[in-house]
Amino acid sequence: MTPTPYVVAEALYKSYGQVEVLTGVDLEVNAGEVVCIIGPSGSGKSTFLRCVNHLEQVNGGRLQVGGEYVGYRQNGRKLHELSPRETARRREDIGMVFQQFNLFPHMTVLQNIIEAPVRVRRIPRHEAVATARDLLAKVGLADREDAYPRQLSGGQAQRIAIARALAMKPKLMLFDEPTSALDPELVGEVLAVMKQLALDGMTMIVVTHELGFAREVADKVVFMDGGVIVESGKPHQVLGNPQTERCRSFLEKVL
């Protein structure tokens, strides 16, 4: 049986003024699949991820998540921008973890995690707290619920950011270089949480420089450069036997 794509990008274009950042990206991500996007800085990786979540508006092409346009509705052959409220509703099934942790500094760890479920999803507070504690145990930080972000290491803060995103019960998780701001010795604890998410069947798109993680966890590796997908395939194919000179050159510099 052919898998059903959960994320579908078709001929995606994005520019800032005269600067073209995405110049025709086509990508499908199946439900339960882990896709790692690699490539040099400025290749459009993070911009693509932000377009999936409609944090950036595309200038051309189509992008659907779970069979719906995130920030648009279709009327005939035209797409029309949704209201911010409707866009936020469609975005609820998408969790995103950034390079910076973006935790609320005046809130405890527990308060950070339950804020969106209570305010946005209207989940009863006691239920949100129970879920938050389960998630804290899952990311190995059950003893830190009363701590404030300033009292956490970078690795701990990023694991809390992952728990906060998971508290919304997303069907898709986006990771934008989640370990790039961490000291090297803290990278492993964040990757371990992400590996477990993959084992649990979470659909994930990960922009990363951690090629060992991509080789071990990804179902598909995508190499981007110049705003397009240059090469994609199984990890052993793209990372072990790249078919394009541009991908080979990139890997020679980073491996």
Image (tube, rainbow, N blue to C red):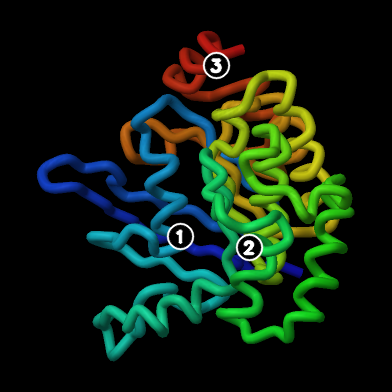
Q: Secondary structure at mark 1?
A: helix
Q: Quadrant of residue 87?
A: bottom left
Q: Secondary structure at mark 2?
A: strand
Asked if the residues shown at circle 2 and circle 1 are in contact, with their CB atoms under 8 angstroms apart, the answer is: yes
Task: Name the amino acid type tagged 1.
Answer: Val
Task: Name the amino acid type tagged 2.
Answer: Leu
- Judging by the rendered image, the residue that carries numbered circle 1 is 52
Give the residue displayed 88% in from the left and 54% down from the top.
137
The CA span between labels 3 and 1 is 26 Å
Q: Which mark is residue 251?
A: 3
Instruction: Name the one closer to the observer, 191 or 106.
Output: 106
Q: Is residue 36 above or below residue 33?
A: above
Instruction: Name the one closer to the observer, 221 or 96.
Output: 96
Q: Position of residue 100 (x, y in %)?
A: 52, 40
Farthest-out residue, bottom? 75
Tag in front: 3 or 2: 2
Give the residue displayed 60% in from the left and 71% down from the top.
116
Q: Is residue 78 above or below residue 3?
A: below
Q: Is residue 147 left or right of residue 6?
A: right
The tag earlier along the polypeptide, 3 or 2, is 2
Task: Name the amino acid type tagged 3.
Answer: Leu
The CA span between labels 2 and 1 is 10 Å
Q: Position of residue 224 (x, y in %)?
A: 44, 35
Farthest-out residue, left? 18
Q: Position of residue 190 (x, y in %)?
A: 73, 37
Give the residue displayed 56% in from the left and 44% down from the top.
101
**Label 1 crowd bin: few (<14), some (14–19), many (20+), radius 10 Å:** many
Q: Is residue 86 left or right of residue 13?
A: right
Q: Which mark is residue 172?
A: 2
